[in-house]
Amino acid sequence: MPRGAWLAVIALVLIVLPFGLKGYTIYVLSIAGANILAAVGLNLLMGYAGQVSIGQAAFLAIGGYTSALLMTRLGLEFWLAFPLAGLLTGATGLILFIPALRLSAIYLAIATLGFGAAVQQLIPLPYWSAIFGGHQGIKVPRPHLGSFVFDTDLELYYLTLVIVLVLLAMSWNVARSYIGRAFIALRDKPAAAEALGINPTRYKAYAFVLSAFLTGIAGALQAHLVGHISPGEFGLGKSIEIFAMVILGGIGSLPGSILGAVFLTFLPHWLEQAKLLYTFLYGAALVLVIIFMPYGVWGFFVRLYYRFPAMQKLFPKGA
Amino acid sequence: MLTVKNLSMRFGGLQALDKVSFTVSEGEIVGLIGPNGAGKTTVFNLISRLYEPTGGQILFRGEDLLKLRPHQIVEHGIVRTFQLLGLFPYMTVLENLLVGEHRDFGANPLAVALGLPSARRQEHDRRAQALWLLRFLKMEALADAFVFALPYGTQKLIELMRALLARPRLLLLDEPVAGMNAAEKAAMREFIKRINSDWGITVLLVEHDMNFVMGLCDRIIVLSYGRVIAEGRADEIQQNPEVIAAYLGEGISVART
Amino acid sequence: MIEQYIVLGLAQGSLYALMALGMVLIFKTTDVVNFGQADMTMFSAYVGFTLLVGLGWPFWAALPVVIAFGFLLGVAVERLTLRPAKEAPVVSLLIVTLGVALMLNAMASWIWGFDPKSLPYAISGPPLVLGNIIITRHDLVIFVTTIVLSLGFFALLKFTKIGTAMRAAAQNKLGAQLLGIPVFRINMLSWGLGVALGAVAGVLIAPLVFLDLVVMIFVMLKGFAAAVLGGFTSLPGAIIGGLLVGLFESLLIAVPFELVNQLKETLVFLLIIVLLAVRPQGLLGEPIHRRV
């Protein structure tokens, strides 16, 4: 089947998917959409550009609070506040870009960790609790277009679907362009990349801004879906969860990040009945996936693809 | 075209280069040879600005290269290859070649993200250019292969192709035939000659294979312990007693042609 | 007054140093950043709780058992999870350590429940007064333990055959393998020692805080930061980094502004980032050479 046909099938499945599902499951699917954007945002930064970040939750928080406050405090319409939140978060990506100019790998990880801790500590300070709502957080209005308010789980699902698909297409375009290639070139052979004219400063800045933008949108989306935002949601645990989505899906692969995000969003819900066993099984799942799929779920599929010719016929190369 | 004046480089206590001076004129193929550790690759790394020299000057067409950052060198027309392969292993051959054309990309990132026609056209044109070169060398079947899976000699050739796509005036080749068999070496020699004569690209190369260097280069510069000890045509170099003495310790006959 | 804060800071910093030392050792020999160090420390501290409170053992008897437990835990983690996953890239191994952490966390909650536990001091009794400095006996134990363990540890690396093998493996894995050094056994040993160092830190920290399932995460993050500050590949750097982080944190408490206290964690990280900006390879790390 050609690529276009596959995309059409996937689109159709995604449109029909919520019918027959419980409202709560539809809601979790929407949350998975937000997580997909966060995972793709980190994957572009870490998998493509090779810049490790364990402070991504800070960008989620900035995006979420910005969109909410632009709507409630400045009275902006959703369609304006939402993208603006992404863009402003993108600009804050430059805060991490500055240490990244000098630091690499583990040292940069500490800087991003510090950034995450700082944002989580700054938000609930009493000095601006009138705006940020302190530890309790604030209510986030439902998205709306004109007088139409996205209120039911189904309406929110379709809104999420459109936003996620548009941003995935944009991410895909960037990843497959000269910019994505420059990221990988600088990651694997920096000297060779620079000798061919790739400016490391510029592309590091691109990577951080792009990653922060996508994560900011993810945070805003999540805030509008949940209807509430508080600093407690954005600790180290959240940053690591996004990190795990990228690794489990397959580092450096955008489809992998989608799978990783969906898997880790649903895993807690599948394990819910397990109660006391829950944390244990979650941890065991992480360990087992890496042992049996060292290059993530997507790497596993790629391996199957090359081992079984039948799959190569079904999915022609380049699809 | 390229003028290196009193270039010195010190790594801690080691004087890797000591006041090295030479020139490369437009249209030449120049070989830079010398025993192991003579400082050949260091010269390349200085020209491509990976190292900061401890002294001296590098001029290219009147421009002071030492004022430039590594990624700006290519804009002036100097492109290099690497001794231990500078290919990006997790990219396909075609993607590697496209990185070679990086200086000809420049679509607005927003246009790229939105998939606007201007960005698509640019990607399409660059791809066509890279595919043209692959077809020119009858290698189009390799376009979608990952480079890490290809034989070493083929990788070397692809790295050279990638350098050519960056539109060099001066090409710096670091051991272009290392690890190749005789037939591959002969093909590479012909290819470099063509690049030089048909496309007008000046070549400065470092190579250990004396047959290859002697049969290809118009002029040869010999480095030993960080100094230029001889310079001249192949036959002059082969008879130079200082050069023979420098290579004696290596057990390689310079006059092996 | 300031001397008092310095002493407190050094005591706290010693514990970060032990934590950092364990993480650096594991990283140096196996390239893995152990994000599970917190939960391994927490679990070992709970074992200490059972011995000290449950069974009423004295501190000097419980400590060696806790160390041995930490060692075996580290060895088991290496053997059962990291070695089977050795094909995976190093960033993925980080997720493995995290998975192990979650499993330990769950097991701790089954065994010891969710209520915070309090552990007794290593030595009880009135604090010692030296001029205008007051030192608790427990802090004194912390100092002595840290000094003894650090020295013993360096002696092990420097003067024993296995220590030489560990340093060789840290320098060059392939080379060590070619020389016939059993790299797998070295990895296991590093994990054992690294986690054991954390276990000691855990059983010494627990009396100062209430021991629960998450408290060690903050200690680990400070230890991690200390390790990076010290250079992440330098063992003396880890100790100096730990002491500096402890000292800085303690001096911040001395600042009479409420805001400084509220932003304590942020300021600690900010200082580290500033220091790293000046010296990107950390205090004692080897400068990163550009490879061509």
Image (tube, coloured by chain):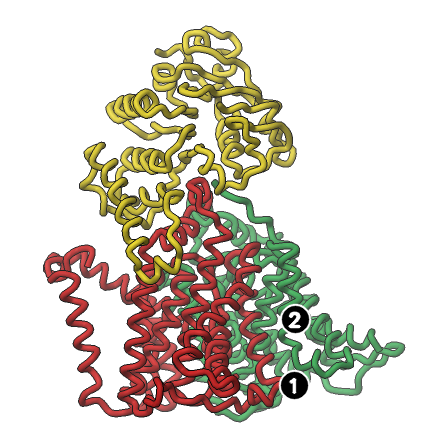
Chain colours: A red, B yellow, C green
| Residue C113 image offset from top left, x and y in percent | 48, 92
- Please give the name of the residue rendered at 22% of the width and 32% of the height, measured from the top-left corner: B137
SS class of the residue under badge 2? helix
Amino acid marked by disc 1: Tyr
Q: Residue at x 66, y 66 (%)?
A: C271
| Residue to which mark 2 is pinned | C268
- Disc 1 crowd rating (10 Å Cα; few below 14, some 14-19, many 20+) is few
Which chain does the residue under circle 2 lie in? C
Side (left or right) of A104 relative to B196? right
Q: For mark 1, what is the residue?
A: A127
Query: Please, which chain is the residue tagged with disc 1 on?
Result: A
Residue at 58 percent across and 22 percent down: it is B20
Where disc 1 sits, the SS reads: helix
Place of residue A58 in the rendered image (x, y in percent of width and height, measured from the top left): 50, 74
User: As shown in the figure, which amino acid type bears the numbered disc 2?
Assistant: Val
Relative image position of residue C288 (x, y in whole percent): 56, 48
Q: Where is residue C53? Give x, y as percent.
A: 59, 90
